[in-house]
Image: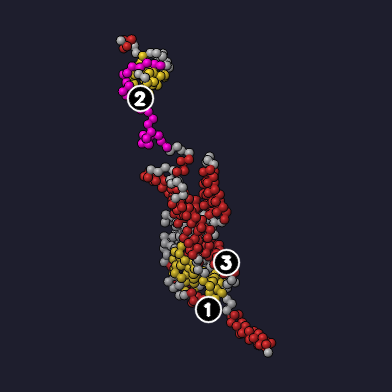
Amino acid sequence: MSRVKVYLGFGLLLLSFLLMLPAIQADTSTVYVIPIEDEVERGLQAFIERGIEEAEEAGAEAIIFEIDTPGGFVDAADGIARSLNKTQLEKLAFINQDALSAGAFLALHNDEIYMHPNGRMGAAQVIDQTGNAAADKANSAWLASMRSAAQTAGRDPDFALAMADASAAIPELGVAEGKLLTLGASEALDVGYSEGTVSTLAELLALKGFEDATVVTIDETFSESLARFLTNPIVVPILLSFAGLGLLLELFTPGVGIPGLVGLTFLLLFFYGHLVAGLAGYESIILLVIGFGLLVAEFIIPGGVAGFLGIAAILGSILLAGGDLKSTAIAVLIAMIVATVGMVIVVKFFGKRLDLFKRIILTDATDTEHGYVSTTNRPELVGKIALTVTALRPSGTIKLDDERIDAVSEGRFIDGGKDVKIIKVEGSRIVVRELEKQEEE
């Protein structure tokens, strides 16, 4: 009886599995959705690389990049484009609102582009940090990248160039020379820069035959969101400036104080953001630890060599962690200027002295404010007659009443046992002159 129950249970389990099998086989396709939102910077690159890697490991059939960005930094856009080019998965760009500047460049690196009816794509001119058009060298490289991206995707490169170069006119779209091209949804469809117009992500999935697919949306973790903020090229100089200023102000206070902790916190935030974003490796952290170790050694073994090497190691670790050497070097320079100005303000207006230098500079003063008196001024001695106890050649000792006093002769030497007249008292310096006979009388 018990065997019958076992066989019956096994048969029911097998039947249940067979009934579920068609459903499992019918829903095997997976589509990943990776948002490209806000500013394009190096932290976004790390997020997108993680999303692509997860999609590849899951065997996804396609990746939809949902784009809504005003643009960002060229170096970050170039790094993201390289990541897009490496994957063999089908890449679909869904411009949900804006794909401007670097966003348009990234859209062109997808196999197909779909736009929201109110979507926009273009205005991709390179802008420097002052808000003006970039130099010819940088602009030329960017134009070549835009042209190459369009050609690789099988699109007319003239429109891509018109997005990035205001001198390229597109009369058929009403874009005169001096203006950048920005395509709307209908215009992009007409010129072949869009494969279709869809209002929602679900509509795009249905259009591509993925309505029954498993949709996996990659969301930023808190660490990635924080890393995107901390690695922003505008935020990096601020982090390093506060770090440098805090550590410098720590030199004004004995022991470990609030400025030092604040400075160290900002420095660690810099390294944390770049580590999470994948820009910094453990070699930069090791170099940072070595740098701080050398600074500590400088306090124990004075000489300056260890301290100089420590500062060099810390600066090297920052440059190594920054990813882009040029932008990081500029951020370090800004931080050094801010820290120097802060030091000058503290010294000038708060009158503090660097505690670091107290090991090598004597700061105690034997002045009258501290109760010290180096000598007693005795102007009442002027005009009195004394006797030389020793020869004055030109200095020696005289005797006034019962007091022995150090003195110097006015000019020539005076032998011992001579009467002298005190003619000048300058602090501890008492000047005497030998009495002539008529003066004695």
Q: Is residue 133 left or right of residue 55?
A: left
For the residues labelled 2 and 3, the Cα–Cα distance comes to: 87 Å
**Who is closer to the viewer here, 157 or 110?**
110
Q: How is the image coloured?
A: secondary structure
Residues under numbered marks 3 and 1 in contact, where contact means CB atoms less than 8 Å apart: no
Taking the spot 52% from the left edge, 46% from the top edge, the residue there is 295
Residue stretch in magenta = 364-389
Estimate the x, y position of residue 355 in percent, counting from the top left.
45, 43
Say what secondary structure mark 1 lies in: loop
The residue pinned by badge 1 equals 211
Number of the label disc, if any, that sits on residue 139: none
Taking the spot 38% from the left edge, 25% from the top edge, the residue there is 428
Residue 226 vs 388, above or below: the answer is below
Estimate the x, y position of residue 144 in percent, counting from the top left.
52, 59
The residue pinned by badge 2 equals 426
Say what secondary structure mark 3 lies in: helix
The quadrant of the picture occupied by the C terminus is: top left
The quadrant of the picture occupied by the N terminus is: bottom right
Looking at numbered disc 3 in the image, what kind of residue is underneath it? Glu
**Who is closer to the viewer here, 229 or 199?**
229
The residue pinned by badge 3 equals 53
Q: Earlier in the sequence, mark 3 or mark 1?
A: 3
Report if residue 384 lies within the magenta region: yes
For the residues labelled 3 and 1, the Cα–Cα distance comes to: 23 Å
Estimate the x, y position of residue 160 in percent, counting from the top left.
49, 64
Looking at numbered disc 2 in the image, what kind of residue is underneath it? Glu
Residue 43 vs 60, above or below: the answer is above
**Magenta-highlighted stretch: main secondary structure?**
loop
**For the residues carrying marks 2 and 1, which lies nearer the camera in this image?**
2
Looking at numbered disc 1 in the image, what kind of residue is underneath it? Glu
For the residues labelled 2 and 1, the Cα–Cα distance comes to: 104 Å
